[in-house]
Image (cartoon, helix red, strand yellow):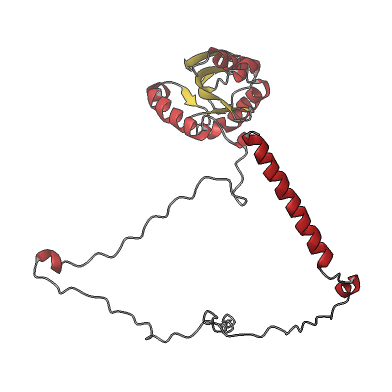
């Protein structure tokens, strides 16, 4: 018999002994009824409510927060006091003895040029002359009257609207006739041409026009030619007054053309006074 055979015989004997031992235990132990296992005494458990116990980490209850004040608290500090202004002693220097000038009022700052609801309305453009007619008339009266003063004083020329009683009615008729036929040339108005020209006009005794000479130009030939033509178209101007002794009347007259911002045309006939 080899080694493996002996090992198997020992293992088989051990298994048989184990089975025999278990059989004996089951045979000789008293059997316990199943009813004993099912019927047992009830177990009662008493539950107690938890009790509060003090702990070292418990914090004391917090006090209730006070409501906010409706009125400010009164000051408990000293009352407000005004500190007297310190004044330096006067010195002995000459500048210290001079009187102190009063403070100058500060100029008011101009308000911004923004459109306010109550701002004043702008002027009507039709009422604004581009060349400031009154100033222009005065300037030409002064300059050209001084230039032609010698001709008027030594000859028989007179300024239109001169203060001669014998010619007042004739001057009114003369101006009225020219206004009825004098036009502002449309091409010149479209080009924004305006100015003043000076004419020398010779009227015969019967009221006809003998000649018209351009003494000073307006700077625009179209305006000058229209002024010359208007004098001829306005004739006849009626006979000269009988109180006027000469056979011809030489008149110096200004013809002014002016435009407004809105494009309206205007004209004036006047003399130097």
- Residue 206 visible to an observer of this rendering: no
Q: Identify the residue shown where x is 61% and y is 25%.
A: 174
* Depicted 38 relative to depicted 103: above or below: below
> Left or right of 93: which side holds 42?
right
> Left or right of 173: which side holds 37?
right
> Left or right of 102: which side holds 201?
right
Q: Which of the 4 image quadrants contains residue 154? A: top left
For this rendering, which residue is in front, 109 or 66? 66
* Depicted 17 relative to depicted 250: above or below: below
Residue 236: percent from left, percent from top: 65, 18
Residue 204: percent from left, percent from top: 57, 16
Q: Identify the residue shown where x is 61% and y is 45%.
A: 121
> Left or right of 3: which side holds 103?
left
Could you tell me which quadrant the N terminus lies in? top right
> Outermost residue, front direction?
1
For this rendering, which residue is in front, 73 or 117? 73
Q: Which of the 4 image quadrants contains residue 21? A: bottom right
For this rendering, which residue is in front, 137 or 53? 53
Q: Which of the 4 image quadrants contains residue 4? A: top right
Residue 91: percent from left, percent from top: 11, 70
For this rendering, which residue is in front, 168 or 252? 252
* Depicted 246 relative to depicted 96: above or below: above
Q: Identify the residue shown where x is 89% and y is 72%.
A: 33
Residue 75: percent from left, percent from top: 44, 85
């Amino acid at each position: 018999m080899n080694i493996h055979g002996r090992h198997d015989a020992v293992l088989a004997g051990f298994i048989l002994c184990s089975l025999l031992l278990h059989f004996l235990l089951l045979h000789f132990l008293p059997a316990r009824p199943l009813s004993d296992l099912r019927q047992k005494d009830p177990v009662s458990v008493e539950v107690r409510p938890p009790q509060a116990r003090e702990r070292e980490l418990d914090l004391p209850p917090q006090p209730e927060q006070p409501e906010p004040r409706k009125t400010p608290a009164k000051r408990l500090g000293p009352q407000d006091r005004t500190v007297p202004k310190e004044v330096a002693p006067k010195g002995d220097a000459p500048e210290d003895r001079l009187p102190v000038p009063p403070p100058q009022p500060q100029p008011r700052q101009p308000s911004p040029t923004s459109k306010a609801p109550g701002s004043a309305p702008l002027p009507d453009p039709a009422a604004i002359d581009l060349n400031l007619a009154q100033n222009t008339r005065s300037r030409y009266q002064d300059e050209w009257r001084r230039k032609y003063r010698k001709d008027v004083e030594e000859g028989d020329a007179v300024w239109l609207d001169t203060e001669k009683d014998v010619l007042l009615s004739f001057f009114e008729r003369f101006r009225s006739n020219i206004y009825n036929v004098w036009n502002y040339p449309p091409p010149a108005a479209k080009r924004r041409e305006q100015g003043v020209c000076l004419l020398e006009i010779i009227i015969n005794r019967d009221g006809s026009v003998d000649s018209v000479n351009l003494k000073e130009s307006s700077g625009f030939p179209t305006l000058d030619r229209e002024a010359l033509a208007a004098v001829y178209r306005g004739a006849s101007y009626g006979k000269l007054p009988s109180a006027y002794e000469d056979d011809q009347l030489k008149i110096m007259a200004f013809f002014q053309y002016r435009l407004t911002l809105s494009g309206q045309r205007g004209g004036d006939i006047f003399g130097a006074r």
